[in-house]
Amino acid sequence: MIVSRTLGILILVHSMAWAGMADPVQPTGLTASHRSGQSFVTWTELANDQNETYRVYRFDQPITAGNLDQASLLYEVPRDSSRFYADRYNVGGSGVWAARYLDRYVIADGGFELSAGTGLLVWTLADADFTSGSSGDGYYAVTTVDSGGVENRTDFSTENTLGPVAESVESPLPVEVAQVGDIRIFIQYMDLRSWNPTFHAPNGTNSYFGFLPFDPAIARSIQYAYTYTLVEPESTVCGGSVPGKLPLILFLHPWQSNSYPPQTSPANYCAIELRPVDTTETWWFGFARDHDYRVAGALDGGEVIANFTERRVLRMIYDLQRHPELASKVDWNRVYLVGHSMGGSGVLALALRYPQIFAAAYSSEPMTRYATAGDGGGTNWDFDLEPKWGTEAQNLPIDLAAPGEWGDPLQVHQGTGVWDWQDHQAQMVSRRAEEAVPIGIGFGSSDTTIEWITQGDPSYGPLHNSWQSFGANVSTDGHVWQDFQGLTPTLDVLNGVPFFGLGAVRDETVPALSLDVPVGTVFPNGVTEVHQNIEWSSSWNPWDGPPIDVPLIWRMSFRTTDSSTQFVRITPRRLQRLMLDPTGYYRWINRRTDGTVVGTGQFQLDGEGLLTLPNQEITPNGNRITIVLELQRAR
């Protein structure tokens, strides 16, 4: 019995010693810095790849083995977490992958890439991180978890703990990586609380960015950072000298199957240009909020589709507005959208959703109803869309957000099915009471990539019935850049520069011109121009002075540019000051520029809160149309 008991004790002691020895070695060299609402935590990983992961903790006091359970576990990240997987591209579609700008992250303006063997977590602070208020000190610790899931929860030293770090809640600014001539490269680090970091991690939807899928670090990787470029104009495109205030153009590129090379071309116009990359092609919208894209499998019926890409793109503009150096260079009243194909599809969506940001937009060959793409025999894009949004039959609900207060007007649409939300043909009409960005759209009637028969042709009826400010053009082209065809004369190209020489402004009323088009009307194939020969007088094209838009009076002048006389419905949009009184009466008068009155009448707001004048005459010499809110009720 004595021998047996002694042997049992020896076995227990040996087991305890073995368990202690089994704890993985902790990381070393822990650092943390805070800038602009984000804390950048780095450490030195184990020297030899042991298929380990690292857990990052935060607390409001120094972290020890005794209080680790009270600390917040921020995230568990794999080895090689400083590798910038999502900044890789398929060179020329060859299957050979390379870094577009960076192989590894940069965490300070003008800093160097993190070295191999460096772990990284970027944490965006929120009020929940502080016991009270929105600022305070944070303490950090990083522990190692071995390949068997065993975490070292006992060894803590200055090598893997640190603090205090002074932190606060702010809207983060991007990190400026480098400047090459007039091209500046930025990294956005998104908030891990509300981001799905698996979609842009190496996985089957992006061909693993050229890596081996069975590598444990690849299989567990996360990605929540993105590069984009900002290009300032050279003096040569500005007539010899660059103005102190410049317009801003957001360019959205077409679909290229992750073969987006570094952007090295100078600015196209005398404007600052933002050029994001839609890695893994979300059609500039987004992807599932909670699905783990690192694991093969279709989206299930409980998923929600978040507008992650919209948020990220809008964030570039929002951050630029707050940039200590660049914000003052931008004329924020002249921000424009331009895109082709997938990019044109994103332009159309943003124009329908964020009129408070953009002055004007141009969309070349856009998708207008994703669910019907390919039904006419052209390219069926379901293979590309369903991994991001689920099937049309599922019609998964959307989760909409945007920086600042830009997303507030869209909250009434939360939960709409994603395929319904991306049905712009229907949305144009159903959301007619909401404002939209004045837009020009160009289609090719021979297009089978984004096919004319399901995307272009059926969109013209809804465009007219949207009562929004638009122009359109149909060429006989296939799927090619439409070169700003479709912009109305007041927003057209002037001396090679769109939006009437980048003069169009956001804070000025515009007209919606439309015909009485029955729902479902299909327009004929071939060359068609819509609103290409009616211009209005504006502050940037004041042939009869700028519009009048004051509390009691709205007035705008119109003329045809092809010697014709036309009759159109006119709806004042983007009103700045005219009072919209649902119980009031408005009197309108249409007077030619020679003084001749050609029509007058009285009306009220319609059921959607819009002022609409049907059948208004427009002549080559011009017509001034005035609307007056009468202070007395009609007699």
Image: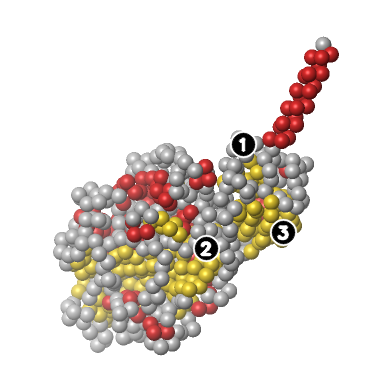
Quick check: 272 left or right of 58? left
Q: Which mark is residue 149?
A: 1
Question: Between residues 249 and 610, which one lies in front from this camera angle?
Answer: 249
Q: Quadrant of the C terminus?
A: bottom left
Q: Which mark is residue 562?
A: none
Assign a secondary structure to mark 3. strand
Q: Which residue is mark 2?
A: 187
| Res 213 → quadrant | top left
* Image coords of residue 373 (percent x, y): 27, 51
- Distance, label 3 to label 2, CA atoms, is 23 Å
Q: Which residue is mark 3?
A: 165
| Res 237 → quadrant | bottom left
Question: Between residues 592 and 197, which one lies in front from this camera angle?
Answer: 197
- Distance, label 1 to label 2, CA atoms, is 32 Å
Question: Between residues 102 and 121, which one lies in front from this camera angle?
Answer: 102
Give the amino acid type for the residue marked by disc 2 in the picture.
Answer: Ile
| Res 352 → quadrant | bottom left
- Distance, label 3 to label 1, CA atoms, is 29 Å
